[in-house]
């Protein structure tokens, strides 16, 4: 029987410091009105001095482990999606591993910028399906503010810091059929590198560099590429847009999110939007939005989720997931307890 990856729990963490559009307007020549109208953002969380990507990742991971009632030792794969690792090496995932005491397997990072979480989910799902790991922690964590040129108003107003996590556990068909990660679909196109990149790195400048973006071009590609990867993921599963309970999109621009929802003819109530409070947190945006919707009771066990994201590379992708644990389909995912998870694994 086919192994599947059940998505058994979620977690997230946001740094304490909140910076409103008004406050940002005192740093650069911008306005609350421009930012709201063009992006839907009203505020963002920014990591404090000395607060690292790993700190956010570890807190999000603990939050997810608590929901599942699992310990670090139950995890045998950690994949962290990040563009803002603590150091050039080792992988930020190894810091998470150490903090959680999760030494029964491998920990590594994945780099696909804003599409990073979807990429990391695909990697972990394939490890679980192949039987190479059983319980995976997948994290999107960023201190993207460290890559921003705070004098470039066309980029610095768009991003925020944060982390989100999900726990995947493999199950051998049976009750897991039709549950968990149904499929993932990844794409990249290096020819579009110059429309969104960081102008530096260890091999080119030996310094970190800053985000540079041709916003209009990225916007155009985002709408067309996300539309086609959404169609691809639905077609691959013989599903229609109307079957989707929740669209959990990358939170880069409210107008892109609305364009996807309109194309799918999904009512606003079926779209999880957090951009107004989180801004674009890159690899963290999808799991942050998902965790929020799980904890406030919108996303329930048994719901069909469509996750999608696009970012620098260009790299983009989508995943279809039936969230939660089969036996608990009538209960909120947030109530999943350790004893209740164990039998299905
Ligand atoms: O997560 C990775 C994927 N990233 C994305 O998906 C981002 C996609 N792109 C976008 O979201 C939008 O293109 C932006 C929000 C970045 C920009 O919106 P836009 O409607 O494409 O605006 P624009 O870049 O064409 O700029 C319009 C005007 C310009 O002024 P002029 O030349 O018309 O006089 C800019 O100088 O807005 C000006 N502007 C600003 N004004 C106030 C640019 N940034 C700001 C700002 N405050 N922060």
Image (cartoon, rainbow, N blue to C red):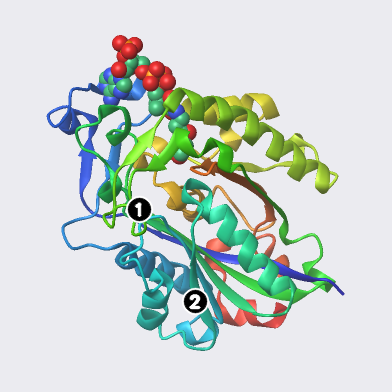
Q: Residue furthest front?
A: 204
Comes first in the chain, label 1 or label 2: 2
Q: Residue furthest left?
A: 26
The quarter of the picture where residue 220 lies is top right
Q: Is residue 292 left or right of residue 310?
A: left
Residue 233 shows in this picture: yes
Q: At x 41% / y 71%, what residue is drawn?
A: 91
Query: In the rendering, at what x and y percent does residue 217 appear?
Result: 50, 25
Image coords of residue 239 (percent x, y): 81, 42
Decide: marks 1, 2 in contact (CB < 8 A)? Answer: no
Q: Is residue 221 above or below residue 197?
A: above
Q: Is residue 155 above or below residue 16?
A: above
**Residue 159 horizontal side relative to residue 103, left or right:** left
- The structure residue drawn at horizontal position 67% and vertical position 72%, both measured from the top left corner, is 127
Write down which quadrant ligand 1 falls in. top left
- Residue at screen point 18% across, 22% down: 29
Q: Secondary structure at mark 2?
A: strand
Q: Tell me the residue at 36%/76% (across/down).
A: 95
Relative depth, front residue between 107 and 210: 210
Task: Note whether 284 is above or below 34 in the view shown.
Answer: below
**Mark 1: which secondary structure?**
loop
The percent position of residue 137, horizontal first and vertical second, equals: 52, 71
Which sits in the foreground, 327 or 132? Answer: 132
Frontmost of labels 1 and 2 is 1
Q: How many residues crowd around disc 2 within 10 Å: few (fewer than 14), some, or many (20 or more)?
A: many
The C terminus is located in which quarter? bottom right
Q: For this rendering, which residue is in front, 327 or 96?
A: 96
Judging by the rendered image, the residue that carries numbered circle 1 is 204
Q: Quadrant of residue 31?
A: top left
Say the numbered circle drawn on residue 107. Answer: 2
Query: In this orientation, which residue lies closer to the viewer: 187 or 194?
Result: 194
Ligand 1 under 8 Å from disc 1 Cβ: no
């Amino acid at each position: 029987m086919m192994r599947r990856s059940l998505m058994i729990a979620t977690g997230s963490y946001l740094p304490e410091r909140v910076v409103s559009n008004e406050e940002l307007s005192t740093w650069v020549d911008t306005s609350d009105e421009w930012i709201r109208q063009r992006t839907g953002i009203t505020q963002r969380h920014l990591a404090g001095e000395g607060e690292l990507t790993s700190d956010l990742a570890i807190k999000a991971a603990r939050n997810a482990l608590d929901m599942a009632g699992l310990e670090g030792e139950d995890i045998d794969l950690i994949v962290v999606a990040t563009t803002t690792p603590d150091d050039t090496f080792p992988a930020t995932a190894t810091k998470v591993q150490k903090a959680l005491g999760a030494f029964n397997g491998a920990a590594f990072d994945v780099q696909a910028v804003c599409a990073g979480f979807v990429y990391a989910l695909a990697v972990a799902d394939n490890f679980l399906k192949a039987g190479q790991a059983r319980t995976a922690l997948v994290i999107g964590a960023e201190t993207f503010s460290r890559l921003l040129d705070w004098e470039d108003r066309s980029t610095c107003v768009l991003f925020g810091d944060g982390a989100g996590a999900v726990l995947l556990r493999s199950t051998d068909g049976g009750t897991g059929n039709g549950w968990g990660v149904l499929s993932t679909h990844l794409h990249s196109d290096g020819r579009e590198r110059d429309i969104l990149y960081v102008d530096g790195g260890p091999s080119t400048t030996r310094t970190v560099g800053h985000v540079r973006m041709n916003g209009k071009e990225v916007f155009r590609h985002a709408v067309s590429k996300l539309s086609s990867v959404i169609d691809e993921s639905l077609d691959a599963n013989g599903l229609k847009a109307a079957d989707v309970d929740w669209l959990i999109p990358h939170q880069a621009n409210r107008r892109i999110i609305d364009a996807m929802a309109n194309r799918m003819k999904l009512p606003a109530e079926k779209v999880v939007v957090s951009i107004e409070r989180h801004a674009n947190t890159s690899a963290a945006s999808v799991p942050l939005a998902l965790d929020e919707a799980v904890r406030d009771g919108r996303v329930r066990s048994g719901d069909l989720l469509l996750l999608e994201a696009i970012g620098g590379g260009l790299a983009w992708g989508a995943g279809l997931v039936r969230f939660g644990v089969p036996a608990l389909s009538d209960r909120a995912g947030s109530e999943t307890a350790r004893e209740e998870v164990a039998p299905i694994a």
